[in-house]
């Protein structure tokens, strides 16, 4: 079993959606040899487009030249062959859809294929690692390792399940740092991680005030923006993450969810008001009121 | 009754603690004629010291020259005579201690003294205006008008009780803008206003995770700071506002308060760990760990 991050050379991503692909890219930029696996070839086309955007971003930030970016990423392997993806790996990061049954099936497969020394991680947002540990066939090497955005929000959550070998946690902390993330450790399994719980509680509190007619969307956002010195308030943020996602967060939270708010966002979803992605949510896009220069005056 | 902000010339502060005095200062800087009242002469000495700090701050920000500051504030009247304070005023802002009985007594007195046209406001943080409206003897002219910091956080909450004349709300919105604040309207009485409810919900969620051993103070703060791009996390903020205040917020919140967390902060208070003001809270001061350059790396 891998007990030090220096033993990790080969890095495998299972599920190359936006976040999965970005984790793989970040690993390649940190010097790991990376294999991106997905069931759909089209994921790779999308991933490569996203990588070009990040290349520009990193160059603009002065973090990495386009030449060095190309050099570090040219050896990334893109494959729809899970055998190839898992055969010779030291570290697996799984980012398939948040579907319990699907993840169980995927981990059963990975468990059969992955080398006996490899570290196995899931990037799930709201599910618990213990739900899949048994399927992986290697509970002691299995842990949640959860990213937020990789290139802008830089936190990685390390959440072991009761059977995770404590040595793995230190390895993951090191790997997190090598991936230019801020590692935080969740000592006990809990749905939603640290930031998501706090972020969710603001959204639910804001949503409940609005749904109960205590204040308008605009005044609640003004209050947050004006006192907290931020350029966006909770309703602007909900439009950004998507009202459908907010709905799932609300349903998944164990406290602090107001059924009056849940009912209201369910109506919004039925009306196609999903936020920025449909042009309409709590605000209208592409020019939401809260971005007006005089919104706070 | 005053129905337009242009009718307001004379501004009275009842209770010249830090916030009350700052509201008065802000009113003087906006061109109102201001009387600061307090039961203790010593409040005025403290207020004048604070005003000197704000004079420096506003000059540094390029908002106001020291000369203009002196000119606008030289006519402020400081008095311990409540008759003088209420005799000839158009607008009263009350900021006495958050004690229901005390506020009732004070509003009985103000009601007897204040002119029949004046607007009467309370700057209470967690109490409801309807609790004092009757004592004021002028329910229709009575409203909560709640400031956060006045010079840094610039939001003012307007919270009518069911008997407040709706015309007053528009006057208060104008006055708020004249005082360089961002007015937000709370349509229904609720304890804690908009920002305080959202801010409180983050603190309670963070506190509950820590109290239940889910993550460390440092990792919870890292998660907030790293994802939200802020220089302080919830535990740093609790040390800033004071653990005793957090305790009162926790007791006053209607949802989302974890008794395990409340018990833990009660122990901290008994140990004299009140945050920055006692040099010890979740962190040690004057050099808390979260301010180290490498805290997020």
Image (cartoon, coloured by chain):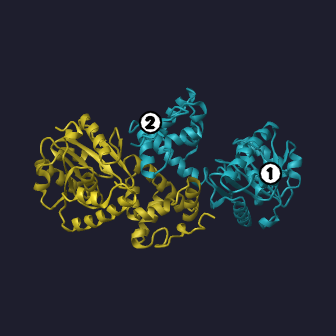
Chain colours: A cyan, B yellow
Q: Which mark is residue A81?
A: none
Query: Residue B127: where, in percent of width, then height?
Result: 30, 50
Which of the two residues, B282 or B180, is positioned nearer the viewer here? B180
Point out the image quarter for the N terminus of chain A. bottom right
Q: Which mark is residue A211?
A: 2
Which of the two residues, B162 or B152, is positioned nearer the viewer here? B152
SS at mark 1 in the image = helix
Q: Is B95 on the left or on the right of B263, as rendered?
A: left
Q: CA distance from mark 2 to mark 1?
A: 49 Å
Query: Residue A141: where, in percent of width, then height?
Result: 77, 59
- Is residue B53 visible in the rendered image? The answer is yes
Q: Is B219 on the left or on the right of B8, as rendered?
A: right
Residue B33 vs B267, above or below: the answer is: above
Residue B268 vs B205, above or below: the answer is: below
Query: Residue A179: where, in percent of width, then height?
Result: 72, 58
Q: Label 1 belongs to which residue?
A: A70
Query: Residue A284: where, in percent of width, then height?
Result: 52, 31
Q: Residue at x 82, y 38 (%)?
A: A41
Do the residues indicated by labels 2 and 1 lie within the same chain of the protein?
Answer: yes
Point out the image quarter for the C terminus of chain A. top left
Number of residue marks: 2
- The answer for which chain carries disc 1 is A
Residue B93 vs B281, above or below: the answer is: above
Q: Residue at x 28, y 38 (%)?
A: B169
- Is residue B128 visible in the rendered image? The answer is no
- Density class for disc 1 (Cα within 10 Å; few <14, some 14-19, many ≥20) is few
- The answer for which chain carries disc 2 is A
SS at mark 2 in the image = helix
Q: Quadrant of residue B248?
A: bottom left
């Amino acid at each position: 079993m891998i007990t030090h991050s220096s033993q990790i050379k080969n890095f495998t991503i299972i599920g190359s959606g936006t976040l999965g692909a970005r984790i793989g890219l970040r690993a390649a930029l940190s010097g790991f040899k990376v294999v991106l696996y997905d069931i759909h070839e089209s994921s790779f086309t999308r991933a490569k487009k996203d990588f070009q955007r990040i290349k520009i971003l990193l160059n603009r930030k002065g973090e990495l030249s386009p030449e060095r970016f190309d050099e570090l990423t040219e050896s990334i392997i893109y494959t729809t062959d899970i055998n190839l993806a898992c055969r010779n790996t030291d570290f697996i990061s799984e980012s398939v859809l948040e579907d319990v049954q699907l993840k169980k099936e995927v981990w059963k497969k990975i468990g059969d294929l992955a080398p006996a020394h490899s570290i196995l991680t899931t990037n799930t947002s709201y599910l618990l690692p213990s739900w899949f540990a048994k399927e992986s066939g290697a509970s002691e090497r299995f842990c949640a390792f959860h990213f937020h955005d990789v290139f802008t929000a830089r936190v990685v959550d390390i959440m072991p399940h009761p059977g995770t070998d404590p040595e793995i946690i230190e390895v993951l902390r090191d790997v997190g740092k090598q991936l230019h993330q801020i590692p935080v450790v969740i000592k006990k399994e809990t749905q939603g991680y640290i930031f998501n719980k706090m972020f969710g509680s603001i959204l639910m509190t804001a949503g409940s005030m609005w749904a109960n007619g205590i204040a308008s969307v605009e005044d609640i956002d003004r209050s947050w923006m004006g006192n907290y010195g931020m350029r966006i308030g909770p309703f602007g943020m909900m439009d950004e993450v998507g009202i459908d996602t907010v709905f799932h967060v609300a349903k998944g939270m164990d406290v602090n969810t107001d059924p009056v708010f849940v009912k209201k966002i369910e109506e919004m979803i039925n009306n196609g008001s999903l936020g920025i992605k449909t042009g309409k949510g709590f605000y209208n896009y592409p020019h939401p009121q809260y971005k007006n220069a005089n919104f706070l005056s």
